[in-house]
Image (cartoon, rainbow, N blue to C red):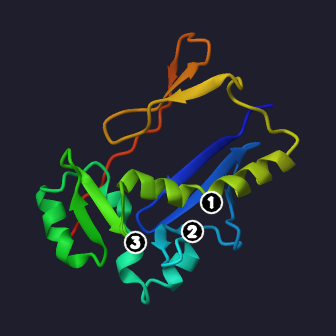
Amino acid sequence: MKAPIIGIDLGTTNSCVAVFQNDRAEVIPNKEGARTTPSIVAFTERGDRLVGQIAKRQALLNPANTIFAVKRLIGRKYQSPPIQQALPLLPYKIVPAPNGDIRIVAQQREYSPEEISAYIRRPTRPNTVSRLSRSRSTRRSWPTSWRTVGRSTPSSRTIWTRASGAPSRPSFAKSRPLSIRGT
């Protein structure tokens, strides 16, 4: 039997996870039962981090701490023209990092766009693991000793290497930032 293929769509507006298994693709619903999750993260005054629909619901009450469209910020420099055009349009605060990149400020803490994207993806993992573990035909597509080295950025790929240092193989998933469009 073939191992399942998991696809993650980290979209600007919505995100979803799908699995291709037994010659069939299936979108895995989130914990609310919806097939897509809004790509929104909110930080509350109590220090809670909200992701998805619940973050979207409170966006009108807490706009300065509700982060959306973060995918458009990945890989950008603070001084780039698209970012400078977007600054007056965004309700949350963006500041320059020491190296010229972007940092997003929420509840007096700075976050990178990649960190916010990871928060969007994090809640999808339990449902995906749960769904795949229920299937008896699920097998790993690489040995458990494989580990990830590096990270996916607009200019690099994730490289998989054996923990023992044996030859590596690349992941063929690439991402690249989208442009920010003003209204």
Q: Which is more N-terminal, label 3 or label 1?
A: 3
Give the Cα distance between marks 2 and 3: 23 Å
In the image: residue 119, left or right of residue 176? right
Residue 107: which numbered mark, if any?
Answer: 3
Residue 37: which numbered mark, if any?
Answer: 2
Give the Cα distance between marks 1 and 3: 21 Å
| Point 27% across, 75% down: residue | 90
- Binning the other alpha carbons within 10 Å of mark 2 as few (below 14), some (14 to 19) or many (20 upward) gives many
Q: Which residue is mark 1?
A: 123
Q: Is residue 59 above or below residue 2?
A: below
The residue tagged with tag 1: helix, strand or loop? Answer: loop
Q: Which is more N-terminal, label 3 or label 2?
A: 2
Q: Is residue 118 above or below residue 104?
A: above
| Point 50% across, 30% down: residue | 171
Q: Where does residue 124 sit, x and y in percent of width and height?
A: 63, 57
Give the Cα distance between marks 1 and 2: 10 Å
> Looking at the image, do the residues carrying marks 1 and 2 touch, with CB atoms under 8 Å apart?
yes
The residue tagged with tag 3: helix, strand or loop? Answer: loop
Q: Where does residue 115 sit, x and y in percent of width and height?
A: 43, 53
Q: Is residue 162 visible?
A: yes
| Point 48% across, 79% down: residue | 45
